[in-house]
Image: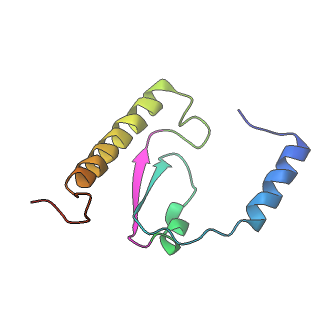
Amino acid sequence: MRFEAPYILEVYDQAESRYVPGMYAGRVIAFKPLEDSINPRGWERIAVDGLEIREVPGNHEDVVAKEAHVRAWAEQLRSHLASAQSAVSRFDTGGVWAT
């Protein structure tokens, strides 16, 4: 679904042109649709710990509209979230890595 109303597009353009992202003290994982020409490399300049690009099936508009695409994206996301949770569970509340 696309929003084509001129007012919505104008508000979106204004917000996008005024937004200045800050540095992110971590690693960014960008999910890029295979059939899309959008380059997520712009995230590198704000991701202190780097950028990882993961490709998912589909294009910008159907990546979350087609069940098979959503399923593939969800599998990758689930894996990354499990890894992050595992890393957090190894870190105790005093800020010391558990062995």
Q: Is residue 3 above or below residue 15?
A: above
Residue 28 belongs to magenta span: no
Coloration mode: rainbow
Query: Which residue is pictured at 38% across the width and 70% down the height?
Result: 49
Query: Left or right: where does residue 37 sit relative to residue 12?
Result: left
Query: Which residue is pictured at 14% across the width and 59% down the height?
Result: 98
Residue at the right extreme of this rendering: 7
Of residue 24 and residue 35, the one placed in the foreground of this image is 24
Query: Which residue is pictured at 40% across the width and 35% down the height?
Result: 74
Query: Which residue is pictured at 19% across the width and 55% down the height?
Result: 90
Residue at the top extreme of this rendering: 67
Q: Position of residue 11 (x, y in %)?
A: 84, 52
Q: Position of residue 32 (x, y in %)?
A: 48, 50
Q: Position of residue 3 (x, y in %)?
A: 78, 38
Of residue 94 and residue 64, the one placed in the foreground of this image is 94
Position of the N terminus, as image quadrant, is top right
Q: Is residue 60 above or below residue 88?
A: above
Image mark count: 0
Q: Is residue 76 above or below residue 28?
A: above
Query: Left or right: where does residue 40 sit relative to residue 48?
Result: right
Residue at the left extreme of this rendering: 99
Please, what is the dominant secondary structure of the magenta stretch?
strand
Position of the C terminus, as image quadrant, is bottom left
Residue 56 belongs to magenta span: yes
Q: Position of residue 4 (x, y in %)?
A: 83, 40
Magenta-highlighted residues: 48-57
Query: Left or right: where does residue 99 sit relative to residue 63?
Result: left
